[in-house]
Amino acid sequence: MSVWNIVLLGSVIVLALKLVGYLVPPSLLERPTPARVANLLTVALLSALVVVQTIGQQQAIVIDARVPAVIVAAALLALRVPFILVITAAAATAALLRFLGWME
Amino acid sequence: MATSSEASAAIRASLAVGLAVSAYGISFGALSVASGLDIWQTCVLSLFMFSGGSQFALIGVIAGAGAVPPVAVGTAAITSAALLGVRNSLYSMRMGSIIGGPWWRKALAAHWTIDETTAVSTAQPTLHGQRVGFWVTGAVIYLGWNLTTLLGALLGDLVGDVRQYGLDAAAAAAFLGLVWPRLRARQPIAVAVGAAVVAAVLIPWAPSGVPVLAAAVVAVVVGLTNWLGRSKA
């Protein structure tokens, strides 16, 4: 599967999902179960992505400078620091640890 | 007329949200190039997919898979992006009654129906403010997100290995930042922890992308049974 196939197919599906909602009667949204599953799906996917991006490397678990960087991000998020600063601080933490040679 | 003050309040909110999100496109562009996509592929994602969570998921899953990712990785990448895009369907159901007008207006609105446009729009007290909020936020983010994506992709291409700048950690922090505001009740917190454990356990055993998809099962099970739910609904 080429990267172009993935990019285009993914884009078409995500765009179609946005269109679908305008065709569906709004009453479905008021039903609690579909709304709840959709919300929790977002939470589960994002949280799994945090884990995979933090400790995953292909098919191995690797503990490196990403781990302290994510801990810094969590602390800043708890302090309600704006999103863009949190991202920057996480990148800076990992970059600094690697520059100093303390972690991979 | 109160109309102009409603509109200007909506425009202020649109600009604040729009500019903050646009800045974040730089990290998407740079990370996408670091994940093995070229500049064109990166820009096509921002132009046509135009949904931050889905875009990050797609590049995150195919990261390091090479020029021709295995079919399993490609399928997982597309499915992850689609699953994260499902919430846009809920937003567009909500926005349908606010946008109104002919079909082509709704079709254009659909492309811009994302977290931020829906959030700004539905926060406005009047229908006029809601419409202004939607279109201004959409325009600011669409323009800003695509320009910063291109900038990030160009910079990312020039600077070489982005790990030395900590951009891999920035991706993890970005996902954490996106999920953080949703962790306000027991049920989503339980799902987040369960999903994290499932993903971590599967990393060494399953191909790239599968851990993320398997974690989605946690949400479906908890959502259908309403385990730890606030009300009996």
Image (cartoon, grey):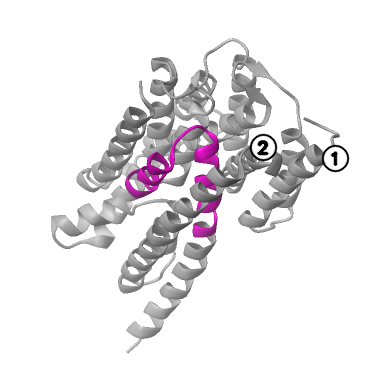
Residue B57: horizontal and vertical position, in percent?
A: 48, 34
Location of mark 1 (residue): A100
Residue B118: horizontal and vertical position, in percent?
A: 39, 56
Label 2 and label 1: CA atoms lie apart by: 14 Å
Q: Please give left or right for residue B60 compared with residue A85 in the image.
A: left
Q: Quadrant of residue B116?
A: bottom left
User: In this rendering, does residue B225 appear at all?
Assistant: yes
> The C terminus of chain A appears in which quarter of the rendering?
top right
Q: Residue at x 46, y 51 (%)?
A: B149
At label 2, the amino acid type is Arg
Q: Please give left or right for residue B110 compared with residue B103 in the image.
A: right
Residue A32: horizontal and vertical position, in percent?
A: 40, 39
- Please, what secondary structure does the residue beneath circle 1 have? loop
* Viewer-side residue, B16 vs B25: B25
Q: Residue at x 52, y 68 (%)?
A: B16
Prevailing secondary structure class for the magenta stretch in the rendered image: helix
In the image, the segment drawn in magenta is B22-50
Q: Which mark is residue B163?
A: 2
Count of numbered marks: 2
